[in-house]
């Protein structure tokens, strides 16, 4: 039961930390969840794109402090590839306003440079200056491999506990290069070592979303409405926090069911404890008589049984917490790699203390029948 | 004093009355000069802990504790003080009763019946009671063990001036006692 509650809280916190730095996410007018899931968590696909023009116009809005575009679409050995500008590294923050830090190397500067997240580097054993190939589409195996599209790793990010760790970051131009015809590609390769500048011949055609940071949080709804009612292009803007809580609301049924099941398990265990103690009281008649004879009051006998039950409960709680901490510590790496979930092992919190208190209270209640039976026997003699 | 008779002939009721666990429906119970029926439940419990020692036939002790802890437990209900003098006193008693020191800290379940009964005597004696009630304490013992048990019990009671009320169906024990009563003589139910 502790595990269910704790993991739920941690997962929510982990997700929230992924979106904490962004005030607004803008994309083509699809669905809230859709936009959130693919822009932040790199899950799913964008069903339509937005134009580069719109990004430019957006970046010039007075309320916008910073912004950067992203384009999602390709994969590399199971990890998503994200096209973006160098502003991504400057402006994206997570958790408590933590900026992205480079464990090695630096941002990309050339078309075929790539910056990888911590998990990617760790799991695939990548280092600076390694050459990798990017394929088209999602999935670890793909039918169309572009062997010419070799990218070079120029940076590796420090771990963040967010989906950033599982992403490969390239320039928008680099991403588009993957989809070009052979001819166009060959032309590109000629300038591959040139730095990307604003005057480059490769202007990104379309992007999937724009992350926006505002000068003041107060203007967020205004800007959102403006974007949502934009007639030039079907766009929408979401507040990540709001979208996230909608996501949790959708999941609440599953969540609550799980919580309910775990509570029922605890309750049924307490019934079992009560039954077991009740049966044992009959066996302990002699012990009770002995206690009475040496001067114990019937109340003493009552409290003896209650204390035994509490002792069992406390011991169980300790064992459960230990087992939980141990398994979380062991599973932490796995969870981070597979699901981008960073779950700490520090399970102690106010909620858990409250739960423990309630469990102990219920134990006292459950132990009442056997304790009372012992009391009654002690009194009758 | 030996009270002889068979189990089920009112023995349990009699003993419960004498040690204050149950109260008479009518009349009074006077033990060691104290009117037990005038005391409330807690007072009787305290009185019993201080002045009466009880020895059972079996299950004299709490099995999951050792000898020392069992005796300490009996002392606990008589008074709050727990001192090293107490531990020494316990050890003396156990030695007098021929309980080997190696057995003092072993759980009771590991001792023989004879040893358990002797530890039971120690437990009954720890609070220096004025009355000891022994309820068929030798019925689970073999002949040698009985002799050991009886000689120890009688000698300690004589030395401490403790009154011994001994119930048993075994008439051969009569020789150890000053006086004896048949249970059937004192157990009279008036029928209306």
Image: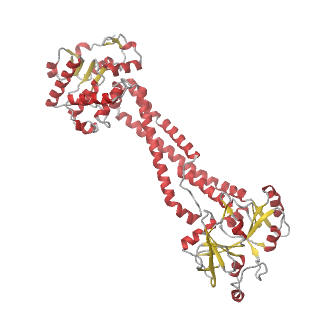
**Does residue B188 appear anywhere in the picture?**
yes
Task: Indicate whether A329 appears above or below B128.
Answer: below
Q: Position of residue B54 (x, y in %)?
A: 28, 24
Image quadrant where residue A286 sits: top left
Please state which of residues B56 and B48 is positioned toward the viewer in this rendering: B48
Please state which of residues B118 and B136 is positioned toward the viewer in this rendering: B118
Q: Is residue A379 found left or right of A23 in the rendered image?
A: left
Task: Indicate whether A40 appears above or below B173.
Answer: below
Count of numbered badges drawn on the protein: 0
Task: Indicate whether A182 appears above or below B18.
Answer: below
Q: Position of residue A29 (x, y in %)?
A: 77, 66
Image quadrant where residue B83 sits: top left
Where the C terminus of chain A falls, by quadrant? top left
Q: Position of residue A235 (x, y in %)?
A: 79, 67
Q: Position of residue A126 (x, y in %)?
A: 56, 75
**Does residue B139 appear anywhere in the picture?**
no
x 27%, y 36%: residue: B108
Residue furthest to the right? A231
x 79%, y 73%: residue: A51
């Amino acid at each position: 039961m502790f595990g269910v509650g704790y993991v739920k809280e941690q997962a929510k916190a982990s997700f929230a930390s992924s979106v904490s730095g962004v005030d607004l996410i803008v994309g083509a007018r699809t669905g809230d969840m859709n936009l959130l899931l693919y822009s932040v968590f790199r899950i799913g696909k964008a069903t339509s794109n937005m134009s580069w023009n719109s990004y430019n116009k957006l970046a010039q809005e007075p309320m916008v402090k910073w912004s950067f575009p992203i384009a999602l679409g390709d994969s590399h050995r199971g990890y998503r590839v994200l096209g973006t500008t160098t502003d991504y590294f400057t402006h994206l923050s997570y958790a408590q306003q933590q900026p992205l830090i480079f464990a090695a190397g630096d941002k990309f500067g050339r078309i075929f440079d790539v910056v990888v997240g911590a998990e990617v580097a760790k799991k695939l054993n990548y280092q600076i200056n390694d050459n990798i190939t990017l394929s088209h589409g999602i999935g670890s195996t793909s039918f169309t491999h572009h062997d010419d599209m070799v990218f070079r790793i120029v940076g590796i990010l420090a771990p963040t506990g967010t989906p950033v760790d599982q992403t490969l970051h390239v320039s928008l131009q680099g991403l588009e290069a993957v989809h070009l015809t052979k001819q166009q590609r060959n032309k590109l390769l000629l300038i591959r070592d040139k730095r990307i500048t604003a005057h480059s011949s490769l202007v990104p055609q379309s992007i999937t979303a724009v992350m926006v940071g505002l000068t003041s949080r107060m203007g967020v709804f205004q800007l959102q409405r403006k974007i949502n009612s934009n007639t030039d292009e079907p766009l929408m803007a979401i507040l990540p926090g709001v979208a996230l809580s909608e996501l949790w609301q959708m999941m609440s049924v599953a969540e609550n069911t799980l919580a309910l099941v775990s509570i029922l398990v605890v309750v049924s265990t307490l019934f079992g404890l009560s039954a077991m103690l009740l049966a044992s009281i009959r066996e302990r008649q002699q012990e009770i008589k002995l206690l009475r004879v040496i001067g114990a009051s019937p109340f003493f006998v009552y409290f003896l049984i209650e204390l035994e039950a509490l002792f069992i409960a406390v011991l169980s709680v300790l064992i459960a917490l230990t087992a939980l901490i141990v398994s979380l510590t062991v599973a932490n790496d796995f969870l981070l790699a597979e699901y981008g979930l960073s779950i700490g092992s520090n399970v102690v919190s106010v909620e858990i203390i409250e739960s423990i208190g309630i469990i102990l209270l219920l134990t006292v209640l459950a132990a009442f029948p056997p304790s009372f039976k012992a009391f009654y026997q002690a009194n009758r003699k | 004093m030996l009270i002889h008779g068979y189990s089920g002939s009112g023995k349990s009721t009699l003993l419960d009355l004498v040690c204050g666990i149950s109260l008479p429906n009518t009349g009074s119970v006077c033990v060691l000069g104290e009117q037990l029926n005038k005391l409330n439940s807690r007072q009787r419990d305290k009185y019993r802990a201080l002045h009466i020692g009880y020895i059972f036939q079996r299950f004299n002790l709490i099995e999951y504790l050792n000898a020392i802890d069992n005796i300490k437990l009996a002392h606990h209900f008589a008074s709050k003080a727990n001192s090293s003098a107490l531990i020494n006193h316990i050890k003396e008693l156990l030695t007098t009763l021929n309980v080997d020191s190696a057995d003092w800290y072993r759980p009771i379940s590991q001792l023989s019946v004879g040893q358990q009964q002797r530890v039971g005597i120690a437990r009954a004696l720890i609070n220096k009671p004025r009355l000891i009630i022994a309820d068929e304490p030798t019925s689970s013992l073999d002949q040698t063990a009985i002799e050991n048990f009886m000689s120890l019990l009688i000698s300690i009671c004589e030395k401490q001036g403790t009154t011994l009320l001994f119930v048993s169906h075994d008439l051969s024990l009569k020789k150890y006692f000053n006086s004896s009563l048949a249970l059937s003589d004192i157990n009279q139910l008036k029928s209306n």
